[in-house]
Amino acid sequence: MDAPVDVPMGTPAGPPADVPAGSAPGGGLAGAGAAGAGAGGSGAADSGAADSGALGAGAAVAPALPSVWRDRRFVLLASARTISVLGSAFARVALAFAVLALPGATPGRLSLVLACQALPQLALILVGGVIADRMSRSRLMMISDCLGAAAYAGLAAMTLTGHAPLTAMCLLAVVAGTASALFAPAMSGVVPQIVPTAQLQQANALLRVGMNGSMVLGLALSGVTVAQFGAGWALALNAASFVVSAGLVRGLRLTTAVRAASSGWADLRDGWKEFVSRQWLWVVVCQAAVMVAATSSTAGVLGPLEAEAHLGGAGAWSAIVAAQAVGTVAGASFAVRLRVRRPILVAVLAVFPMAVPMALLAAHVPVWVICLAMFCSGLSSDVFGALWETTMQREIPEAVLSRVSSYDWFGSLALAPLGLLVAGPIAAVVGTRAALTGCAVLTVLATCGALLSPQVRSLRAAPAPGPSGD
C-alpha cells in the first residue's frame, strides 16, 4: 500500500503504507491525543523508569509482556502489511521506469504521474478519516486494497503490452492515490481494536519491524526484478500483494459501533474539535509539517544533487538511503520493549537526530559518516513513530480516532509538496550547501518550538504493566 508521500530521510511518521517508518509522510505522523489530559497530561503514576541524564524523560526497558503473536487477528494484520509493503517497494521503482519507458517520456511526464498519485492522497485523507469512523475499518482497508490491486494491475497490463497512454496511467495513479487516502486513517484506528491497551506499543513496533524489513528487502530486489523481467512484472507483483493483503484483512472481521446519523461536515468538525483541543497534538503536527518539508526536500532534491556533485553519484546516495532504511528496522526492534514516562517529550527529542544528515551533507564529510548519521536518524524516527502511534491510540477516543489521525496526516504532509517545489530553485540561487543547512536549521527550530509546549513536556504514559508470562 502506498504511503501518502515518500520522505526517506527519517520522517517521524507512522506509515500506513509502503514507506518505512520514517518515510512517508509514511507516514505522516499517526497523531496522538490526550483525552482528558489537559495541560498536565494524563497524570499517570510515575513508575519503573529511571529519571536521570538523557533518560530524564523516563526511558527504560519494559518488563516482559504477553506476545501479541498469540492473537490471530494481529498475525493477520501484520502479515497483510508486511506482504503489501513488500509489493509496494517493487512498485516504487517500477512505476518510474514504466513511465520513462513510454515514447517521448520526459522527467516532466514522470512528475505528472507521480503528482496524480500524490494529490488524492493529501486531498482525500480527511474524507478517509470520516469514512473510517463510520464503517468497519477492516472492510474499508479491504476495499482500499482492492482499489490498489485494480490500479496496479491496470498499470502492469499497459506496461507489459506496450500500450500505455499517459492519460490512462495518470487516471490509474489517481485511483492508487485514492486507495492510500482511504487506507491510512483506517489503519491508524484498527490496531487498538484488536490489541489490548497494554500491548499497543509492542504491537505498533512489531508492525514497523515487519514493514521496514519488507521495504528494505523489496527495494534491494526491485532493481534486479525491473532489470531482468521488466517494470510491468514488478507492477504486477504489487497488484498481487494487494490481493493477498485484502484476503488477510478480510479475516479481521471488525465491527464499528453504531453512531447517530450526522453529515460528513459535522463529522469533520467533530474530528477537528478533538484535534485542536489537545495542545501537544497540534503542536507536534506543526513541528512535523516543517520537518517533513525539510526532509522531503533533502531526500527528493537536495541530497541527490549533493551526492552527484561531491559524493560520487547514485551509488553513494543509494548507500546513504539504505543506511536510513536499516536504521528504521533497528529502531522498531528497539521500540518493542522501550517504555518511557513522558512519551511525547521523548518523541519530540527524537526528531533532533534527523537534522544531522542534512548538516553533514552540507559539510561534505565522507559518505560513511553520513551513512552512520542516517542510520541513527532512521532509528530515532521509528522510536518516535512507535511512541506517537501508541499515545494516540491510548488517548484518543476510539470513535473519532481515524478522523483525528486524518488531520494528523494532512497537517504533517501539508508542506511537503511546497518543499519539493521550492528546493530546486532555492538551491540554484543560494547553493545546495546553504539550502541543506537551512533545512537542518528549520528542523532544529521546529523541534525547539515544540518543546515550549507544557503538554509536550508533561504528558504521561499509562503506568507500565507488571511482568507476565510470555
Image (cartoon, rainbow, N blue to C red):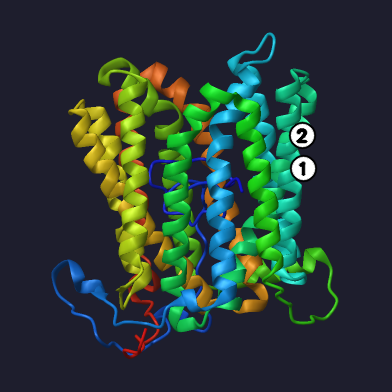
Closer to the camera, 419 or 128?
128
Residue at x 31%, y 57% (from the top left corner) = 350
SS at mark 2 in the image: helix
Residue furthest to the top in view is 104
At label 1, which amino acid type do we have?
A: Ala
Question: Which residue was labeled with disc 2?
Answer: 154
Residue 165: image quadrant is: top right
Relative vertical location of residue 414 with respect to residue 104 in this rendering, above or below: below
SS at mark 1 in the image: helix
Residue 404: image quadrant is: bottom right
Q: Position of residue 420 (x, y in %)?
A: 51, 31
At label 2, which amino acid type do we have?
A: Gly
Could you tell me if the residues under marks 2 and 1 are in contact, i.e. CB atoms within 8 Å?
Answer: yes
Q: Position of residue 130 (x, y in %)?
A: 73, 64
Closer to the camera, 189 or 157?
157
Residue at x 76%, y 48% (from the top left corner) = 147
Relative vertical location of residue 319 with respect to residue 346 in this rendering, above or below: above
Q: Position of residue 279 (x, y in %)?
A: 48, 69
Relative vertical location of residue 91 with respect to residue 279 in this rendering, above or below: above
| Cα separation between marks 2 and 1 | 6 Å
Q: Residues within 10 Å of mark 1 (few under 14, many from 20)?
A: some
Residue at x 74%, y 39% (from the top left corner) = 151
Question: Which residue was labeled with disc 1?
Answer: 150
Residue at x 57%, y 42% (from the top left corner) = 88
